[in-house]
Image (spheres, rainbow, N blue to C red):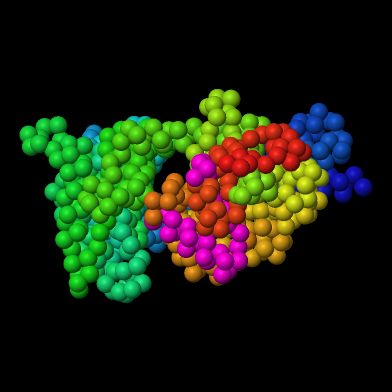
Amino acid sequence: MELVANGAIAAAYFIIPLTLLPLLLKAKRDIWLNLLLLILFIFSCGIGHTLSAMNLHNALWHWVTAGVSWAAVVALLKSQTRLRYLGETFSLLEATWEQALTGKLLFERTGDDLKVLKLNPAATAITQKLLQPGDRLCEKMPIHRQQVYPYRVSLIDLYLAALESGEPKRLEYQYKGEISGWYMTLVTPLSPELLYMTFTEVSGVIYDPLTGLYNRRVLEMELEAWEVCLFIDLDRFKLINDQRGHYLGDELLKAVAGVLQDQAQTQNGVAVRNGGDEFLLLLPAPDADSTEPCPIPAAIAEKVLSDILAIEVEGASISVSIGVASGTIDAFQEDMPINRLLQAAETALREAKRNRRSNLPQHRIQVWNSALARRRLRQITLEAYLEQRSSELEFWLAYQPICHMQTGAIVGAEALIRWDSARLGSVSPSEFIPVAEATGLVHRISDWVLCHALEQLAQWQEISTQFNLSINISPLELEDDDFLDRIMQRVAEAGIASNRFGIEITERGIYNNLDRYLQSLQELRAMSLRLKVDDFGMGQSGLAQLLQFRFDEVKVDRYFIPTNAQNLEKVAICRAIANLAEGVNFDLVAEGIEHAEQRSLMLGMNYNYGQGYLFSRPMTAQNLTTLLREGTCLAAGG
Ligand code: C2E
Ligand code: MG
Ligand code: MG
């Protein structure tokens, strides 16, 4: 028995070095780990022999030491598997180095230049075989020592700066010399002396194929600090495309691009097609050394405008609106100055479009100014405060009675939101609702209004079953299926007669997306809610279109309510609407009745209902409750 055991131990000691030897020879990379295992192995053999020498001829001890040795072998084998994987990964990396489409280079710093250690075939191809291992970069491609566009320092300095900082750096630049084009380069320092670089040509990605201008991508690049931005938008371009075809549209776009390109060249800037019919002209700060007077941005905009107005393609011409911004802008929460400049120019452009009083050039160009900046800052503040949930605690609903025009009896009311902000004071809904619409916060506000108005209506219906209440909703709600579901659910929960609850939506709002909105309105109608067109007359007056859909009530905007009978135009408009109402059968409400004369004029034209300061200003729910309880008639006999 002991013989067998001793034989096994001897075999074990004999086999272990034999197994390990080839492995150790192969294992080059993980040398320290292997050395450690080898020491462990010798150590365990040593213990075995020491034990024998000390005559502690106990088989158990031999098994222990042999076990430790075998454990070392297993660990070694495992590390070999890891090494095999590493080896495979390295050969894979080698393949991506060889077959990559991007150029890859390894450089070593030599003084103020970089020596090529290794480069892949793509790098050889892109640099047109200019570089070989051992070459110095700037010797072979001296443009690296000059300033490349758009950087104001030489390319080699940027590389060396990356080496010194130890941080990878992404650069996009235009290289004009031995090779020409736009390149994107990623430089990664590996050590204080070694630089790994990948680069690829991006010219195709930077240009807009139709106009040959830069496309928006150019804005993402670290371009120089542009000082001036012209944001240019073609007026009614969609109409031209639809009516005269895309070919003509394209030709006009190219012609506009030509004008902008000329300006960009004379002013040392860049012209960009921002997408669709939008263009940008970005200009640098005036050169401090230049002796020539620098044209002011507005003058450049006027020149661009007149050149574009002069364009004619196949008898078609085009006009544009231009927003101009220059200098430092701090009205926008953007990190990059270029984005702030763009936003300011775009805001100015929207203002030019919104405020267009005539086709005169001065109304087509809007320069970003302190008034726009103030308005923008105010919007940011409102946005920030509205976003806080606590703002809901500062909302309340005012109710303005809607009266029977003849008797002054209160037939209903309109709920109007009020915001008494602790920090901003009381803010008008005409100011904060548009901000809420632009940020999507309006959904939360509408829901708040809906809940509170319904709760109030339920109480008033206990006083009078005939009482109507309406709320204003933003047209954006009609795009939101959730909102429609919510109305349905909340109305059902409120336990009110739904035909006493009205939804007001402005005529202008409906026109933004008539087909879509009419479909949503249809759903509201199916819930038997009262549908009201608000501020009627202020929209684009596609009366016929609007009449496709039968509204229950039309509220004529106060702008159209004549102040006296001499106000012939307004009288004619109100009469026309009243005639229509008779034929199509909807109720008419005259908004903004302030004087008794207006009331009798409107009564004479068959306007049965009115709302306005003559009857009452918007009031608290409590005050209206008192009036309803007492059955008060407002401005009775006025
Ligand atoms: P609107 O729906 O056309 O409401 C009528 C506005 O005219 C109210 O202004 C009201 O106070 C005012 N007004 C009423 N009678 C007279 C009058 O005789 N003379 C004059 N000069 N003004 C009169 P308010 O409350 O400032 O609301 C302005 C607009 O804000 C509303 O116009 C409505 O479009 C919007 N709005 C108000 N509350 C809400 C709301 O809860 N949700 C939404 N989405 N919009 C709301
Ligand atoms: Mg209204
Ligand atoms: Mg109104």
Question: In this view of the protein, which residue sits in the foreground, 609 or 156?
Answer: 609
Residue at 36% x, 66% y is 238
Confirm whether residue 22 shows in the render.
no
Q: Residue furthest front?
A: 637
- Residue 598 pos. (x, y %): 50, 47
How far from the left and from the top, in percent, is residue 284? Answer: 22, 40
Q: Quadrant of the C terminus?
A: top right
Q: Which of 485 and 132 is in front in this view?
A: 485
What residue is shown at x 7% (from left), y 37% (from top)? Answer: 292
Q: Position of residue 340 (x, y in %)?
A: 37, 39
Residue sitting at 84 percent across and 44 percent down? 6
- Image coordinates for residue 42, horizontal then vertical, percent: 68, 37
Could you tell whether 490 is left or right of 77 in the image?
A: right
Secondary structure mostly seen in magenta is helix
Residue 244 belongs to magenta span: no
Q: Give the range drawn in magenta.
A: 569-597
